[in-house]
């Protein structure tokens, strides 16, 4: 299992907020998952769609949670498929994906955050890269 980032709206009290506009989310997901046919299926509240994309070094799994008035949240799981290899090619491959998720969060007035730390402030591409593919690994010896 890889690291998961989520795009979701929150209200002023920090609780889950209004759904994301489906047209904006679907447009971004079509770029990210290259027109996956699942994106053309009818969406009903409570549906969860799983999308997949595999690159040279990374695999991306997207989970789209449909709400009553749009998309409740989008969770994207990032997995490095080449453990032990230099990290820079992985960073290069995930950067465009992170750029799309950051843009989606901004366009929809939502937050992009790490599932493991939902209280963390909104992630930028650079902070998400450092989280998912750190270049300064701790010395384990």
Image (cartoon, grey):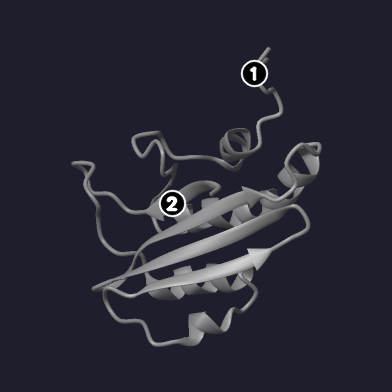
Q: Earlier in the sequence, mark 2 or mark 1?
A: 2
Q: Is residue 54 visible?
A: yes
Against 100, is 82 above or below?
above
At a point 72% along the width and 43% down the height, the residue shown is 91
Residue in front for this viewpoint, 81 or 66: 81
Residue that label 2 marks:
6
Q: Is residue 32 visible?
A: no
User: How much space separates mark 2 and mark 1, taking CA atoms?
Assistant: 26 Å
Residue that label 1 marks:
138
From the image, which quarter does the C terminus lie in? top right
Residue 14, picture quadrant: top left
Residue in front for this viewpoint, 62 or 111: 62
Residue 6 placement (x, y as % from top left): 43, 51
Name the outermost residue toward the front: 141
Q: Is residue 88 left or right of residue 59?
A: right
Q: Is residue 12 left or right of residue 100?
A: left
At a point 46% along the width and 53% down the height, the residue shown is 105
Residue 48 placement (x, y as % from top left): 37, 71
Looking at the rendered structure, the number of numbered marks drawn on it comes to 2
Residue 33 placement (x, y as % from top left): 61, 70
Q: Which mark is residue 65?
A: none
At a point 60% along the width and 39% down the height, the residue shown is 132
Indicate the secondary structure of the residue bearing disc 1: loop
Residue 121, picture quadrant: top left
Residue 129 placement (x, y as % from top left): 63, 39
Q: Is residue 38 left or right of residue 48?
A: right
Mark 1: few/some/many CA within 10 Å (<14, 14-19, 20+): few
Residue in front for this viewpoint, 106 or 133: 133
């Amino acid at each position: 299992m890889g690291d998961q980032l989520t795009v979701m709206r929150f209200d002023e009290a920090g609780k889950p907020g209004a759904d994301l506009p489906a047209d904006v989310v679907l447009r971004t997901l079509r770029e990210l998952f290259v027109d996956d046919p699942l994106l053309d299926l009818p969406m009903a509240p409570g549906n969860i769609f799983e999308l997949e994309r595999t690159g040279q070094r990374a695999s991306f799994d997207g989970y789209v949670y449909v709400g009553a008035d749009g998309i409740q949240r989008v969770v994207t799981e990032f997995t490095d498929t080449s453990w032990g290899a230099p990290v820079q090619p992985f960073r290069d491959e995930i950067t465009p994906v992170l750029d799309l998720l950051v843009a989606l969060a901004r366009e929809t007035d939502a937050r992009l955050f790490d599932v493991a730390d939902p209280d963390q402030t909104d992630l930028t591409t650079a902070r998400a890269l450092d989280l998912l593919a750190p270049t300064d690994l701790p010395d384990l010896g």
